[in-house]
C-alpha cells in the first residue's frame, strides 16, 4: 500500500506531538511530582492539562506550516454553489500556484506547452513542472509527450 507524502507528514506530526506530550508529562511529574494534599489537591491534573495544551498547540502550528491550504488566508473567499461548474469547484480547492497554472492552461486553450504556461504565469519552468505534476496526479490535467516537450490540456471531466 502506497502512503502519500502528506499523510506520512501528518502521521509524523501527530506522533511527534504525542511523544512530546508524554515526555513533558513524565518529566514534569518526576520533577514536580507532588501528591495531592489539602493545600494543593489538583496539581497533577492541572499540570497535565497545561502539558496537553502545549502539545496540541505545537501540533497545530506544525500542521499550519506543512499544510498551508488550511490557513484562513489561503482559503478562497467565495464558496462554490450547488450549480457551480466543475472548473469553479476545482479552483476553490487548489492552492494559489495551482489555480494560477490552471487558469493559464484554460486561457491558452487546448493543448498548450509547459514553457508557454511558465511565460504567462511568470513562474520558473521547474515550478510549473512541479505544479503540473501535482495537477496531473489529481487527474485535473493531462499531458502528452511530444519530443522533448509535452502538451498540457484539461481533463475531459473538467471541460
Image (cartoon, rainbow, N blue to C red):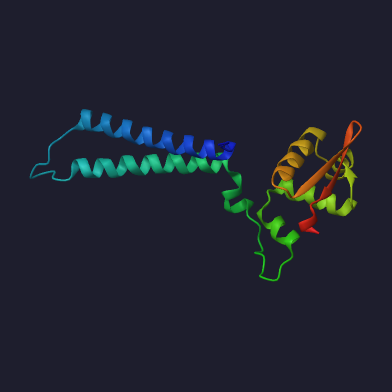
Task: State the image coordinates of residue 102 (x, y, percent, origin top left).
Answer: 78, 50
Q: Quarter of the image for the N terminus: give it.
A: top right
- Residue at far left of view: 38
Q: Is residue 5 above or below residue 46?
A: above
Number of on-image labels: 0
User: Residue at horizontal 27%, vertical 41%?
Assistant: 48
Looking at this view, is 153 or 130 the one in front? 153
Write the residue at 49% across / 41% down. Answer: 61
Kindly identify the residue that appears in the image at 77 percent across and 41 percent down. 132
Relative image position of residue 69 (x, y in whole percent): 61, 48
Which image quadrant is residue 145 in?
A: top right
Q: Where is residue 52 in the image (x, y as percent from the top left)?
A: 33, 42
Q: Is residue 100 left or right of residue 24?
A: right
Q: Position of residue 51 (x, y in %)?
A: 32, 39
Q: Which residue is drawn at 85% across and 43% down?
A: 117
Image quadrant assignment for residue 159:
bottom right
Q: In this view, does 136 lie above or below 125?
A: below
Closer to the camera in the image, 35 or 135: 135
Which residue is situated farthest in the right direction here? 147
Q: Answer with left or right where residue 10 lies relative to residue 145.
A: left
Q: Residue furthest front?
A: 1
> Is residue 157 left or right of 46 when viewed as pictured?
right
Query: In the displayed structure, does residue 59 sit left or right of residue 100?
Result: left
Q: Residue furthest bottom?
A: 83
Amino acid at each position: 500500500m502506497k502512503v502519500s507524502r502528506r499523510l506520512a507528514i501528518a502521521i509524523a506530526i501527530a506522533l511527534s506531538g504525542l511523544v512530546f506530550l508524554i515526555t513533558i508529562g513524565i518529566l514534569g511529574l518526576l520533577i514536580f511530582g507532588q501528591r495531592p494534599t489539602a493545600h494543593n489537591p489538583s496539581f497533577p491534573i492541572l499540570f497535565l492539562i497545561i502539558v496537553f495544551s502545549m502539545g496540541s498547540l505545537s501540533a497545530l502550528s506544525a500542521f499550519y506550516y506543512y499544510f498551508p491550504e488550511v490557513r484562513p488566508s489561503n482559503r478562497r473567499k467565495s464558496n462554490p454553489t450547488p450549480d457551480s461548474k466543475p472548473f469553479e469547484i476545482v479552483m476553490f480547492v487548489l492552492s494559489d500556484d495551482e489555480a494560477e497554472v490552471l487558469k493559464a492552461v484554460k486561457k491558452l486553450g487546448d493543448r498548450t506547452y509547459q514553457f508557454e504556461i511558465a511565460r504567462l504565469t511568470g513562474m520558473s519552468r521547474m515550478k510549473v513542472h512541479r505544479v503540473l505534476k501535482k495537477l496531473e496526479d489529481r487527474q485535473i490535467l493531462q499531458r502528452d509527450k511530444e519530443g522533448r516537450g509535452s502538451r498540457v490540456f484539461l481533463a475531459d471531466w473538467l471541460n
